[in-house]
Amino acid sequence: MTFKVSIQPSGHQFDAKPDETILQGALNNGIGLPYGCRNGACGSCKGKLVSGSIDYGTYSASALSDAEKAEGKALFCCAKPLTDVTIEAREVDGTKDQQIKILPSRVQSMERVADDVIVLSLKLPASERLQFLPGQYVEFLLKEGKRRSYSMANAPHDDAFVQLHLRHMPGGHFTDHVFGKMKERDILRFEGPLGSFFLREDSDKPIIMVASGTGFAPIKAIIEHALYREIKRPITLYWGGRRPKDIYMMALCQEWVKTAPHITFIPVVSDALPEDDWSGRTGFVHRAVVADFPDMSGYQVYACGAPIVIDSARKDFTAQCKLPEEEFYADSFTTEADLAKGA
């Protein structure tokens, strides 16, 4: 038995197969819906159930609160229809014709750019090429069926290697291996490209970009793509870290500012120590944005980082700064702990 899923406001319809999530059904039918983690942890796929009944699946309470659920909201990456349903969701152009592949890759280099951050460069087989949009991610396929997601930090035109920024999470199944045992020429398998976090080039609105920690990776890809395409929309980049060393490519950002007058870079540090001799902006990165842009009604925002940063930015930007909800694009980095928080 299949159930018909109708999408508002586009009017698109598709039949969902048994045990198929609404998101997967849409993607299988060439319909792009926004998504990130695909595990009910980041909230990127959140939309509204207009009519019908669904199995909400297993998800993190931080991604879908009881109040939101009572308002009819659902996470389409884990919700499955139990009847014919009508949903309200914005659709995503640009990804429907992509070919998602499972590919082997060889570790080309491992560059330690901070105490706890490695820039990992992967080489694909000579016969393969990964076509992706700047800001998308790949999922490593690990033993025992485990997966780990990382955003690509290189722009599509610079595709000699797939570049990823990995922060060491002590006790983490994958990053303990990367920082402890991995070596050049090791083989890794991944699936990609995935995700709906990428630059919307059909807009001429000025852009605010917010990165926390290694959330800088997809932001870097988007900015380098924009520079390559000679997109002149004003870009204001805020990059937050606990200490200055967490802003591990500060020199690159400063170089962008020198060569591209339409780019502004504002690093923000929350927990600087006296020995850091930090004289720049302090506090939480999203609050620095709120202070500088009290009216975001004419802007687009691209934000990437820890879930608490993304959730706080979405709430404050839309509620306090009049940012249209549909102009907030986000990629929330979920950890193993986040994925374990089922409801």
Image (cartoon, rainbow, N blue to C red):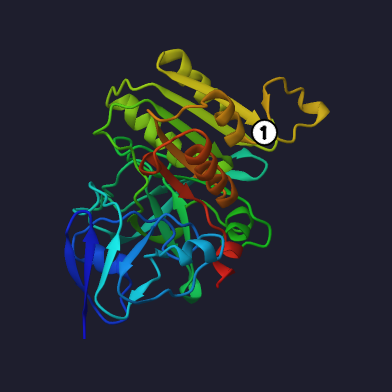
Q: In this rendering, would 340 be left or right of 223?
A: right
Q: Secondary structure at mark 1?
A: helix
Position in image of residue 336 (x %, y %):
57, 64
Q: For the N terminus, which image quadrant?
A: bottom left
Image vertical order of residue 229 relative to residue 110, above or below: above
Residue at point 51%, 35% (across, down)? 210
Extreme residue in the bottom direction: 1
Q: Nearer the viewer, residue 131 or 330?
A: 330
Residue 242, percent from left and from top: 69, 38
Q: Is residue 293 left or right of residue 55?
A: right
Q: Amino acid at mark 1?
A: Lys
Foreground residue among 331 and 15: 15
Q: Nearer the viewer, residue 263 or 217?
A: 263
Residue 296 on image: x %, y %: 44, 29
Q: Which residue is mark 1?
A: 245
Q: Is 192 drawn above or below residue 23 in the view shown?
A: above
Q: Residues within 10 Å of mark 1 (few under 14, many from 20)?
A: some
Residue 53 vertical placement versus 161 (above, below): below
**Residue extending farthest right:** 274
Considering depth in this image, is 235 or 84 the residue closer to the camera? 84
